Image (spheres, rainbow, N blue to C red):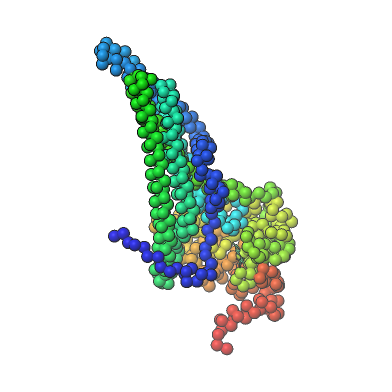
Amino acid sequence: MAEETAVTDTDADRHPHTEQLTFNFKGGDSAELAQHLTGRSLSRRLPALVGRSLALAWAVERGSTIALLTCQVVSGLLEALGLFATTSALSALIQSARDPAHLRAAIPSIAVLAGAAGLRAILAIAIQGLSNRLGPRIAREAEFRMLEAATNAEMAAYDHPGFNDRYDQASRGVEVSRDMIGQSQNLVSSLATLIAAALVIGALAPVLLPLLALTAVPRALASVAGERVAYLATLRTFHDRRMLSMLRWHLSHKDQADQVRTDTLAPYLLDKYRSSGARVDRTNDEAAWQQARISLLGSAVGGLAAMLLWAGVMVLLGTGYISAAAAGTLVFALRSAAGGLHGIVGYGADLMRTGRYMDDWEAFIAEAAGQRLDRGNIVPGRPRYVALDRVTYRYPEADKDTLHEVDFEVRQGEIVAVVGENGSGKTTLMKLLSGLNLPTSGVVTWDGVSTRDLDPHTLWRQCAVVPQEFARWPMTARENIQLGQPQPGADDAVQHAAAASGADAVIAVLRNGLDTLLAREWWGGQALSSGQWQRIAGARAIHRDAGLLVMDEPTSDLDARAEHRIFSGLRELAKERAIVLVTHNLANTAVADRIVVMQAGRVSDAGTFTELTSRPGLFRELWLLQHDRAHPAT
Ligand code: ADP
């Protein structure tokens, strides 16, 4: 049963001042829209789109592209040849009605006609095959370029509003890019048909050409106007469509599936889903209705013009301006022309639509390229000294600084713990130390060289980072530790790192040891608990044997034994590394040579564990609070 969607009051209706998600979409620019969707732009834009699809095809396979173009041109020429042959064949056939001896004269033209038709059929199959071959390759190339652009962008790009939204939009461009070559090819072939027919009509009765144009223009204009309506509807529904996809993810993804149930949240989220869906449907219905009216108008005017055209043929025949054979050919040519026109309008509209998505794809690549990792090329060695000098950092588009004039240093052989309350800037500090982000002002140096001047990829090879949200790669245990970069000693090095983080106990119970797939169960992997995963992530960082080891809450999910193992092993690891450690468990900071206390983006204190616990300050306060909770009844 088609259920009527009831739009209930949303939270936003009940609390009008509540903040709304802002999805950022560049295509909403009406000037850009006007430029892309007017009748005049059609003549410029369509060739550009065909050019773009051919350029992509050229980039993936030159041979097939040349073959495709050749088949197109030959097919168009054969179409014209066939139409011209029609005239002589018809004239011979008409004469043979009076004198059967003329029938023989028709044979060559009929042979040409049949030959051209047969060849065109073969060429059509070749064209289809070549398009099918190129389409998926083009889509892969488009996706590759997008992924390459994304992975080569500065991390900060992800903090720019709309970067992720535009990535999603660009993915749609990738999806449709496979259709582009087929649409271009259909458009060109329709154009070839039209040109061939127009040539024949022009040769037989040029006076009909303006009338032919008159049948085409209203339909083309109606198509462009219809596209504009559809595009505007896409823009108006953008926010709700993004909302739908976000809700879809939150309602169905395993990560929060437990809370959707225990918090009995599903009805609330489903209600939001219904409301957004209903708004999308309403806008689309209005657009579809408007498009239907525009099409009707275009077809009516085009139909009237077609009547005039046919009347013209009758007048020409009646006045003896053209022969019966020519009139017959004109009928064929006009039908061909109508087919060509129909194709141009239809495929043109398809191509325009695809082109719009491809614009989003191109815009994303340009945006990511604008934020490409463009740093120096000094190659860093194993760092002996990493420091921040009066570093201030502000996230893109944020209205205040997250770090203010922070000074910080860590040397090889040293363990520095960073503590502070939530939001004090510890994670941001880690991102700057490891060269993921560059400071807004001040300088982060590795052995005295600014991270701006260092080659980022070599720098990261000297970095082992365990972030709070570490990746759980759907790969084997070995790959999850080695990350495709085996150390000398191969599995021995893996086992050694695993032993240092407590991951050895995890591997020991895996059904197939290091060869066990750690993907999600439904991909055939063996599921691990959060703590088990954290041990693997620890092993990953230790295995990396990098000069700077940065750990952001590396033991938050670990049991006491595993945590003890990691911390008691740190001193040994620090012999050849500089280690920076963020932790909320202040007892763990006792292992550090120095503790840095962060408060509201500043370093508020620093010292050894004994110094900080024995003098008043945030550290002592937090330490006593933790202590207090451990022994509540005093
Ligand atoms: P901590 O690790 O100490 O909890 P963070 O360094 O993660 O703190 O964050 C410090 C502050 O920086 C946060 O309160 C937040 O305001 C801001 N912040 C963090 N990440 C971003 C981001 N991607 N974009 C904008 N602001 C951010």
Q: Residue furthest front?
A: 319
Looking at the picture, does residue 560 appear above or below residue 110?
below
Residue 567: x %, y % from top left: 59, 68
Residue 457: x %, y % from top left: 62, 50
Location of the C terminus (image quadrant): bottom right
Residue 187: x %, y % from top left: 44, 35
The quadrant where ligand 1 appears is bottom right
In this orientation, does residue 604 appear? Answer: yes
Please report the residue visible at 59 percent of the width from the left and 65 percent of the height from the top. Answer: 552
Please report the residue visible at 61 percent of the width from the left and 64 percent of the height from the top. Answer: 427
Q: Residue furthest bottom?
A: 634
Left/right of residue 554 with respect to residue 266 in the rendered view: right
Q: Residue furthest top?
A: 101
Residue sitting nearer the eye, 408 or 19? 19
Residue sitting nearer the eye, 369 or 215? 215
Looking at the picture, does residue 178 appear above or below residue 5?
above
Location of the N terminus (image quadrant): bottom left
Left/right of residue 197 with respect to residue 456 in the rendered view: left
Residue sitting nearer the eye, 551 or 141? 141
Please report the residue visible at 40 percent of the width from the left and 63 percent of the height from the top. Answer: 274
Please report the residue visible at 53 percent of the width from the left and 53 percent of the height from the top. Answer: 28
